[in-house]
Amino acid sequence: MTTTREAIARLLAEAGGPMDAAAVAEATGIHVTTARFHLDQLVAGGSVMRAPDPEGAVGRPRVRYSPAAGVRGDPARAAMVTALADALDGAPDGAARARAAGRAWASGLPEATGLPAVLERLGFAPAHEDAGIRLRACPFADAARAHPGIVCEVHRGIIDRVLEGSTARAELVPFAGPEGCFVALSHVEEASGDKVASRRR
């Protein structure tokens, strides 16, 4: 028998785009408060991501939900990623190879404008903060906790490749608090022929 939560996850997977809690409630025949509860649980479990609606009304932004990209919620793929990370972890060039893999992965992604758009596409649920970007979800969280020196290097490679050729610089800070990892951003300005890095605040 399909549970309400499973029905919501299937609804989001089959929807043509993100849905808000009211639309989910209407489609599943439950109260909107109940829909929000189940959506929050799916987000906590990593199978669903949430993001503010950029076209929402002024004031408190409407939140929309969509399936998280990546491997969380897919045990077979998650096990494969963990096995690959385990194989690289401890190798003398493991971190470098992981970072190179991230760069190669980013090179093959469909074109997206800017780092936040790429991170959104990959399922990291990015949110802008004064000094950078908060990653509120990680599609590879379990493997990252077990092998941060490999999985996080893949993510660093993705970021490096996306920012290549721009004046922006980024430092990924894994597990930088309860809300996830953090990408600290800075930019490089040219002054009198010299490049001076200055932190955006």
Image (cartoon, grey):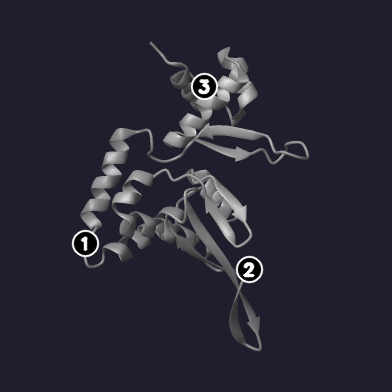
Instruction: Say which residue appears at 41% left-offset and 41% top-offset.
Output: 70
Query: Farthest residue in the bottom direction?
Result: 192
Disc 1 residue type (three-letter) = Gly
Which image quarter holds the N terminus? top left
Q: Helix or strand or loop: what does disc 1 sit on?
A: loop
Q: Are marks 2 and 1 in contact (CB under 8 Å)?
A: no
Looking at the picture, how far across and down is residue 74, in whole percent? 35, 33
Q: Is any part of residue 71 visible from this angle?
A: yes
Q: Helix or strand or loop: what does disc 2 sit on?
A: loop
Which image quarter holds the C terminus? bottom right
Instruction: Say which residue appears at 47% left-offset and 53% top-offset.
Output: 177
Residue 78, picture quadrant: top left
Q: Is residue 163 above or below residue 10?
A: below
Disc 3 residue type (three-letter) = Leu
Query: Farthest residue in the right direction?
Result: 58
Disc with the residue nearer the chain's start (2 vs 1) = 1
Looking at the picture, how far across and down is residue 98, in whole percent? 33, 59
Q: In this view, does 186 lie above or below 60?
A: below
Disc with the residue nearer the chain's start (2 vs 3) = 3
Looking at the picture, how far across and down is residue 61, in whole percent? 70, 38
Looking at the picture, how far across and down is residue 172, in whole percent? 46, 61
Disc with the residue nearer the chain's start (3 vs 1) = 3
**According to the image, label 2 marks what residue?**
200
80 to the left or right of 35: left
Nearer-the-camera pick, 176 or 147? 176
Q: Helix or strand or loop: what does disc 3 sit on?
A: helix
Instruction: Say which residue appears at 25% left-offset and 49% top-offset.
Output: 84
Disc 2 residue type (three-letter) = Arg
Crowding at mark 1 (Cα within 10 Å: few <14, some 14-19, many 20+): few
Instruction: Say which residue appears at 47% left-offset and 49% top-offset.
Output: 178
**According to the image, label 3 marks what residue?**
11
